[in-house]
């Protein structure tokens, strides 16, 4: 179906405004929380502002009584506070653009990002594992719908081919003996490494994949609406090599070029990540190939 370019642009702007409003609301909550904590801290460390018996209480906090007993000293009337669990409150504001965020070695594999229920020890092993960079974000709603207990989408924003290779053993260590493994990665390598080096990274990843599973699917790189001639040429070159390499290794290569070429309506405003429509197209294509592989 044809989508008016102006309507598509308005929809993208609306989604962007919604994201900004959500971030602004989060920042307001953070500021309110900081102001409240600063007030409590000031009252606790300033003797002149403490009464002889000053009680501080709030929802979810245990009442604490502080008695003035000279400068810098607190009486034994202080009750033991409950343990406080700390977390990174700015984590939800972290950038998710592949070109801005790297995939550090210490960052854990994001198994939980896609909301999959953890497989309990002794339970059924997963039959399908989809691994990739942020291009596959959101595909779990379609890919895991047939059976959330036996399927998993592992999204690693900013990941390059070597990052997937380094984490592959840990990601698959508790999965089935011969799961269907789908890999979509390489976008973040384009323009940042020689093509020969990228091919070497793919070959190293292929050796690990072949050792772990006999049912491997390699998803080709997507065209980018805003790519210049040089970057577009590199992407095409990598896809051509991947197709030939997969044939030699016994992997299944799945290309998407014709489905996404000249389809700006399937991408977000940055021209790199997929919007909801694009994510749906990619997920359905992967799901069809996975289903055929499982039934083979």
Image: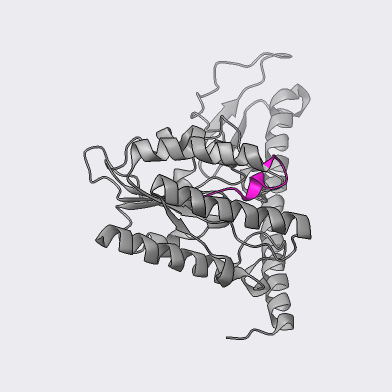
Going 43% across and 47% down the picture, which residue do you hit?
Answer: 248
Up/down of 16 relative to 28, above or below: below
Locate residue 203, reporting x and y percent: 51, 38
Locate residue 280, reporting x and y percent: 50, 69
Locate residue 200, reporting x and y percent: 57, 36
- Total numbered circles: 0
Magenta stretch containing residue 49, yes or no?
no
**The N terminus - image quarter:** bottom right
Magenta stretch containing residue 187, yes or no?
yes
**The C terminus - image quarter:** bottom left
Q: Is residue 222 visible?
A: yes
Is 59 on the left or on the right of 102, as rendered? left
Q: Is residue 228 visible?
A: no
Highlighted range, magenta: 184-194
Locate residue 267, reporting x and y percent: 65, 67
Q: Looking at this view, is 239 or 49 the one in front? A: 239
Going 46% across and 50% down the picture, which residue do you hit?
Answer: 246
Q: Looking at this view, is 74 or 13 the one in front? A: 13
Q: Looking at this view, is 141 or 84 the one in front? A: 141
Quarter residue 268 falls in: bottom right
Quarter residue 22 falls in: bottom right
- Secondary structure mostly seen in magenta is loop
């Amino acid at each position: 179906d044809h989508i008016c370019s102006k309507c598509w642009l308005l929809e993208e702007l609306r989604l962007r405004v919604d994201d900004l409003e959500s971030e602004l609301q989060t920042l307001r909550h953070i500021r309110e929380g900081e102001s409240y904590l600063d007030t409590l801290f000031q009252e606790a460390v300033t003797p002149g502002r403490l009464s002889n018996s000053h009680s501080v209480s709030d929802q979810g906090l245990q009442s604490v009584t502080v008695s003035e007993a000279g400068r810098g000293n607190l009486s034994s009337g202080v009750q033991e506070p409950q343990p406080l669990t700390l977390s990174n409150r700015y984590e939800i504001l972290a950038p998710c653009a592949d070109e801005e965020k790297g995939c550090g070695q210490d960052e854990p594999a994001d198994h939980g990002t896609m909301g999959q229920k953890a497989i309990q020890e002794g339970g059924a092993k997963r039959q399908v594992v989809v691994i990739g960079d942020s291009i596959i974000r959101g595909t779990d709603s379609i890919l895991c719908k047939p059976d959330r207990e036996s399927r998993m989408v592992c999204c690693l924003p900013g990941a390059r081919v070597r990052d997937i290779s380094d984490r592959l053993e840990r990601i698959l260590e508790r999965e089935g003996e011969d799961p269907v493994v789908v890999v979509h990665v390489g976008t973040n390598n384009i323009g940042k490494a020689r093509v020969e080096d990228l091919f070497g990274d793919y070959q190293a990843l292929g050796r690990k994949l072949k050792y772990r599973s006999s049912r491997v699917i390699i998803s080709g790189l997507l065209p980018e609406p805003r790519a210049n001639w040089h970057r577009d040429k590199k992407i095409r070159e990598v896809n051509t090599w991947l197709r030939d390499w997969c044939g030699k290794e016994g992997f299944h290569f799945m290309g998407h070029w014709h489905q996404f070429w000249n389809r700006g309506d399937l991408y977000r405003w940055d021209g790199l990540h997929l919007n909801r429509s694009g994510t749906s197209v990619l997920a359905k294509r992967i799901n069809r190939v996975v289903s055929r592989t499982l039934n083979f």
